[in-house]
Amino acid sequence: MAILVWIGAAMAVIGLAGILYSLVRALGARRAKLDDEAMRARLQPLVPINIGAFLFSFLGLCLVVVGVVLA
């Protein structure tokens, strides 16, 4: 069951990287001081990346918990 823990930890780290990526891109858009419509256009593609990264990280953490409980 240790393999579940390692796979889950890797998934959580990849999800965290996706979250940090979307955070950096959003802060870059904020620093650009765009108007509302341009800001919305810049942030729109980041929403699915952010949600997917949170989901991937959550599933990874669930795998870690399952691996620890079964061990």
Image (tube, rainbow, N blue to C red):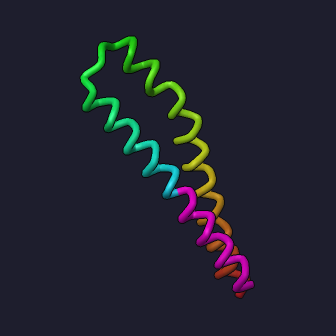
For the point 49% across and 56% down, which residue is it?
Answer: 17
Counting from the top left corner in percent of width and height, residue 33 is at: 25, 23
Give the number of marks. 0
For the point 59% across and 57% down, which residue is it?
Answer: 58
> Is 7 on the left or on the right of 48, as rendered?
right
For the point 72% across and 81% down, which residue is it?
Answer: 3
Counting from the top left corner in percent of width and height, residue 67 is at: 69, 78
Q: Which residues are magenta?
A: 1-15
Would you place residue 2 above or below residue 48 in this image? below
The foreground one among 23 and 8 is 23
Query: Magenta segment, principal secondary structure?
Result: helix
> Is 40 on the left or on the right of 4, as rendered?
left
Indicate the quadrant containing the C terminus: top left, top right, bottom left or bottom right: bottom right
Would you place residue 56 above or below residue 69 in this image? above
Rendered image quadrant of residue 49: top right
Rendered image quadrant of residue 62: bottom right
For the point 43% across and 51% down, which residue is it?
Answer: 20
Q: Is residue 7 magenta?
A: yes
